[in-house]
Image: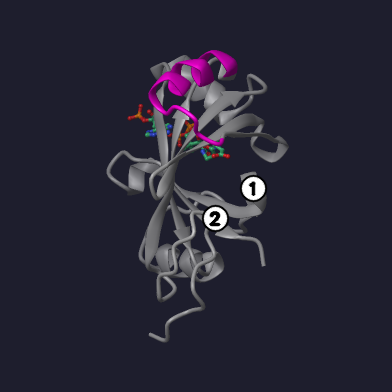
Amino acid sequence: MKPCDPCTGSIGLQPTFDVIQMNVDHIGIAVRNLQEALSLYGKILENANIEVEEVPTEKVRVAMIPVGETRIELLEPLSEESAIAKFINEKGEGVHHIALAVCDIRGSIQKLSQQGFRVLYPQPRPGSHGKMITFLHPKSTKGVLLELCQLQK
Ligand code: CMX
């Protein structure tokens, strides 16, 4: 398969991926209270350049904390209808998803759908930091919710 343009994920990696090769963009952690979680994680990840953003399409407020070549994303629900609120109500706070940066999200969706994965957004949606996102249902990925994300083009 022909390699795509280098991924322009915000963590600065320059891989020569084909459409389905990926790197870990971030790990999402569901929290009840973002400020409280930020002051806690700030003790572990000192002097991190943290960006906070609301993502209305997902009904969440997120904080991205750089950690080496990847990031931790703290997610606070903005409404009881948020997937994060449901997750916390059922399981408590904790690791919610792993996000993989892809070069061509539509190509990845097509390929993974054909392979039988349950793609939650057949059309990618806007996520944080101007990225287009979709998810693979945890029942098709051994119990882990996987996000696919790509910088908007
Ligand atoms: N990780 C692992 N398993 C999960 C899960 C998660 N994050 N969320 C739900 N599940 C499991 C449940 O425990 C349940 O398993 P059991 O049946 O064994 O109890 C099963 O998935 C439920 O599946 P469901 O009934 O199909 O779906 P839910 O209503 O529970 O919703 C999901 C789950 C993944 C489909 C939904 O959360 C979703 O659409 N997520 C994508 C969007 C999202 O998560 N947005 C928030 C983050 C946004 C961002 O990063 O910006």
> How far apart are the two marked residues, 2 and 1, measured between alpha carbons?
9 Å
Crowding at mark 1 (Cα within 10 Å: few <14, some 14-19, many 20+)? some
The quarter of the picture where residue 93 lies is: top left
Evaluate if marks 2 and 1 touch, with contact meaning CB atoms under 8 Å apart. Answer: yes
Q: Which residue is mark 2?
A: 10
Q: Secondary structure at mark 1?
A: helix
Up/down of 72 relative to 123, above or below: above
Which residue is disc 1 drawn over? Answer: 129
Main SS, magenta region, reads helix
Q: With respect to residue 53, does 92 lie above or below? A: above
Element type at marker 2? loop
- For image coordinates 52% across by 59% down, the residue present is 9
The stretch in magenta equals 35-49
Position of residue 25 relative to residue 67, above or below, is below
Q: Which amino acid type is shown beneath numbered disc 2?
A: Ser
User: Which one is earlier in the sequence, the residue at label 2 or at label 1?
Assistant: 2
